[in-house]
Image (cartoon, helix red, strand yellow):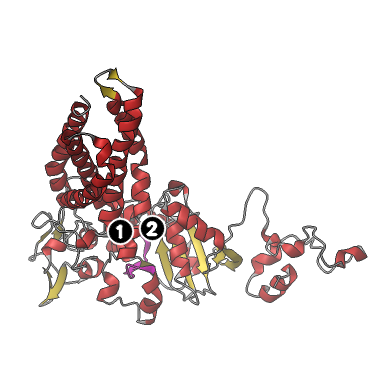
Amino acid sequence: MKILPMAIRSDNSTQNPFQKKGPGLSTNNVQLMPSMNMPGLTCATEETRPMAAYDRPGYELCRYVAHFMETDAGPVPVIRPDLDKKDRLSTIAVRCGIRRDKYLVSPGLYGIGSPDPDSDVLVTANYKLTFDHLRSALEGISAWILVLDTRGVNVWCAAGKKIFSTQELVNRIQAVSLEKVVAHKRVIVPQLGATGVSARQVKVQSGFRVVYGPVRAWDIPAFLTKGKKADKSMRQVTFTLFERFVLTPVELHGALKISGIAALVLFVLSGIGPGIFSFHGAWERGLVSLSALVIGLISGAVLTPVLLPFIPSKKFAFKGILMGSVCVLLLLPVIWDRIGSMAGAAALIIFTVMVSSHLAMNFTGATPFTSPSGVEKEMKQYIPVQVTGILVSAGLWIYSAF
Amino acid sequence: MQDFRYLEDVATLVLDEQKCIGCGLCTEVCPHAVFEMQENNARIVDFNACMECGACVSNCPADAISVSPGVG
C-alpha cells in the first residue's frame, strides 16, 4: 500500500512536529488537471515518494530511516528494524570482502520503534553490518541507538584497537546531548565493547552509567526483559560452524593478491628447464603447480576454518599442515601423469602443505579465542618452517624439470 | 566454547587477589568465563581460556588485573 505524505503528517503531527517543517508545497489532493487522476500514469508524482517531505538539498535520505521524531536535542531519525533486499545483497558482498572498508553509517543518535525519555540507549559501532544486525534484532522494541564513530569497524575489533573507546563514547554522549533526550543516566554497551571502554571513566566523565549488554545483538530482547541481566550463555562468545563458514570468503579475498603474485612466480619457475626457458613448460607445468596452489588455498582458508574443531592439534599452523596433507593426497592421483617425477611430486606436496599451514595460521586473527601471546609463539615456531618449506619446494620443482 | 582451546600456559593474565574489591565486573565482561566470584572475590578459574582481549583490565576499578601481550 502506498502511504500518502499527508497521511504521515496528520498521523504523526502531534508527536512529530519536525515533519511540519517539511515543504508546504505538496500537490497532494490538489487537482490541477483531470489527467492527474488517470490510473497508470507513470509520472513521478509525490505519491510515489512518501519520504519527499524530508528532502534537503545535497543530502540523500538513508533507506533504513522510517521518519524523524522531534526531541529536545533536535530531530532524531527513527529507523526500521527490517532489512530490505539491498541490505541483504550488500551483506553478502561485504562478507566476500567487497567494499568492506567503506560500509558505514553516520555516527550519532537514532531511534527505533517509538522511543521515549525512559527508553534504553543501546551503544553500537558504525559498521553497517553491525548496525543492520542490531536493528534487525530489535523488531518490536523501542529504544535509542547511539552509534559511535568506529571508522566502519565492528564493535569488538574497534574496541581492541581502542577506537570504540571511553573517549569516543563520552564525546558522542555529549555531541548528541543525550541528557536532553533521555530522563535516565545509563547506556547499554555491548559486552565486547568492554575491551575499549572503562565503565568507571565513562561515569566520571559523562555522568552516564555503563551497563554491559549481551555479546550477541539477538539476545538484547531477552536481556531487556530479564531486568538488564545477562545470563552466562549471553556472556560467552561462540564459534559455530556457520559463524566460521561466513568468515571464509574474506579469508580467500585477503589471500587473493599474494596468490596472484605466487601464480605468476609459479609459471616462471615452471618454464625453467633443460632448454633454459620454455613457454610450453611454463604453461604445462605452471598449470600443474597452480592446481597445488589452489588446493592449498582451499585447504588453509576454507576447509581448516570450517572444520577447525575436528582437526587435531591446538596449533593452527599444524592444523593447516594436516588438512593440506589430506587435500594434496586427494589431488595427486588426478595430476600424477603430468608431474613426471618423484621430485616434482615432493615439491607439490610440500608447497600445498605449506600454503595451507600459513593460511590456517592467518585465520587465528579471525577467531574469537586465540590469544596474541599464543599466536606470537606459534608464528615464531612455524614461519621459519613455512618459508623453508616453500623454498625447498621451489628448488625441487626446478630440479624435477631436468 | 570448550571445543575451542588454544595454546596453554601462554596468556599474560595476572590477577592480584589482594587488590580485588569484589565488584564482579570482570566476570561480566570476560567473553570466556575466565573469572568466577568465590567468597566475594574474583578468582581465575579458566586461565587457558584467556585470549588477552583486555576487557577485564580496562574495567577493573581496583587495577587488580593486567594482561600484556607483545603484539596485536
Where's residue A3, x and y in %?
70, 71
Q: Residue furthest bottom?
A: A226
Categorize mark 2 by other alpha carbons within 10 Å: few (<14), some (14-19), many (20+): many
Q: Residue furthest right?
A: A34
Return the residue at label 1. A197
Callouts 1 and 2 close, C-beta under 8 Å: yes
Return the residue at label 2. A169
Categorize mark 1 by other alpha carbons within 10 Å: few (<14), some (14-19), many (20+): many
Where's residue B52, x and y in %?
19, 56
Tag of residue A342: none
Q: Earlier in the sequence, mark 1 or mark 2?
A: 2
Chain bearing tag 1 is A
Name the kind of residue labelled 2 in the image.
Leu
Mark 1 → mark 2, Cα distance in angstroms: 8 Å
Dividing the image into 4 quarters, which one contains the C terminus of chain A?
Answer: top left
Name the kind of residue labelled 1 in the image.
Val
